[in-house]
Amino acid sequence: MDPVSKTGLSLMAPTGSQIKTNTAADDGETFANWLNGAIEEVNQKQIDSQDMTAKLVRGEDVDLHNVMITSQKASIALQTTVEVRNKVIEAYQETMRMQV
């Protein structure tokens, strides 16, 4: 289990058995699919958190600690996504500053 799996995101690099040789077009498509999937996972965690909170407010049979755990998972997943985005933007900006 990778260290990030507790948040539900799998940001680890693929292992040797998961790496396959692709053409350049396939690589871009695979990365786009991975990125889209990761964002959908974060979105689903946010939706789950909202649903659990709404159930608690309506007085349905949900435990407060489960609502808080779901909320924290969504929060951590979102924070991780924002930090990864910040690092990608920072790397892009650094690349653009390079002199050729």
Image (tube, rainbow, N blue to C red):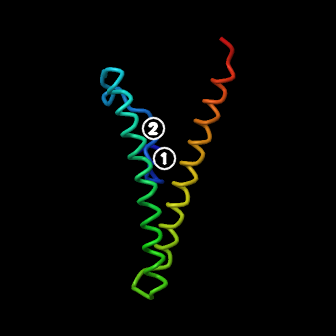
Q: Residues within 10 Å of mark 1 (few under 14, many from 20)?
A: few
Residue 99 in which image quadrant: top right
Q: Give the x, y percent position of residue 43.
A: 44, 57
Q: Give the x, y percent position of residue 67.
A: 48, 73
Residue visible at 65% across and 34% down in the picture: 90
Residue contact at pointers 2 and 1, CB within 8 angstroms: yes
* Residue identifier under label 1: 4
Disc 2 residue type (three-letter): Met
- Front position in the image: 64 or 41: 41
Residue 89 in which image quadrant: top right
As measured in the structure, the alpha-carbon distance from the residue carrying label 2 to the one carrying label 1 is 8 Å
The circle drawn on residue 16 is none
- Front position in the image: 21 or 73: 21
The circle drawn on residue 12 is 2
Q: Which structural element holds mark 2?
A: loop
In the rendered view, does 31 fall on the left or right side of 22?
Answer: right
Q: Mark 1 or mark 2, which is nearer the start of the sequence?
A: 1
| Quadrant in which the C terminus appears | top right
Residue visible at 55% across and 60% down in the picture: 75
- Front position in the image: 95 or 2: 95
The residue sitting at the top extreme is: 100
Q: Residues within 10 Å of mark 2 (few under 14, many from 20)?
A: few
Above or below, comparing residue 40 to residue 48 in the picture: above
Disc 1 residue type (three-letter): Val
Q: Give the x, y percent position of residue 16.
A: 35, 26
Q: Give the x, y percent position of residue 59.
A: 44, 88
Residue visible at 47% across and 82% down in the picture: 56
Residue visible at 47% across and 67% down in the picture: 70
Q: Which structural element holds mark 1?
A: helix
Task: Count every numbered label the image shows and give the total.
Answer: 2
| Quadrant in which the N terminus appears | top left
